[in-house]
Image (cartoon, rainbow, N blue to C red):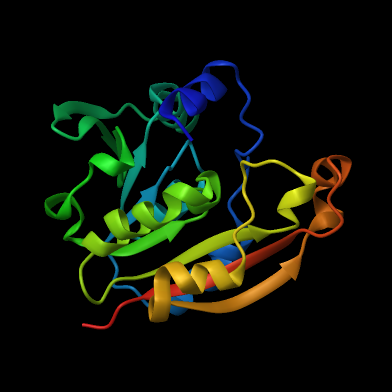
Amino acid sequence: MEADFWLERWRAGQTGFHQARITPLLQKFWPGLALPEGCRVLVPLAGKSLDMRWLAETGHQVLGVELSPLAVEQFFDEQQWTPRRWQSAYGEHYAAHGVEIICGDIFGVDRALLQNCVGVYDRAALVALPPAMRADYVRHVYGQLPDGYRGLLLTLAYDQALMDGPPFSVEQTEVERLYGAEAALIDQRGILDKEPRFAERGLTRLDTLVFRLGRPV
């Protein structure tokens, strides 16, 4: 999707994709990654996700990347945190209480920024991208993470012919094609009964998939 699409969604308050709670699947499966306390965790297309606060409270240094300044400002306002702010080549940085968010383009990050990101949590990025952009996204972001990184990827799977994205359907076969041996499915469950707005749009199946990500040293 073009940047203007997401900026307009935030300006118009069309943010039904935002969860007003911590993602239960994050809480369930993150501890199994056994990442070292204090390590840096990348959250791409972060929005104002409360998951970032949870990851920081778990003891990690969180690095979010988000295009919309409204989303970034709302995150810190809603946590009642006053962030330090500074500019870099990546965009404007906001940081407080273990969470740093760069207001900038995920395709503008580089290896120098990501080389210390031992962890990654992707709940909203891959499913926000149309098929034509996904391979470039995975290559650009995950290809620049260090060997030995570990993380979680959450996707949705449904009949794409029945509903336009975003969020787009990203099935297991596509994740395996994009990530190869770096992705392993660890959980899949139907959630349509918990998401009536998707049923109202015509879906008859909606699964959430959880993948463990990692690349050996």
Figure disc tally = 0
Q: Residue at x 71, y 52 (%)?
A: 160
Residue 39 in sight: no
Image quadrant containing the C terminus:
bottom left
Q: Is residue 71 left or right of residue 20?
A: left
Occupied quadrant, residue 15: top right
- Looking at the image, residue 8 lies above or below residue 72: above
Q: Residue at x 36, y 58 (%)?
A: 138
- The x and y percentages for residue 61 are 28, 54
- The x and y percentages for residue 143 are 26, 63
Occupied quadrant, residue 156: bottom right
In front: 146, or 28? 146
Residue 191 in sight: yes
- The x and y percentages for residue 30 are 48, 69
In front: 140, or 36? 140
- The x and y percentages for residue 185 are 56, 77
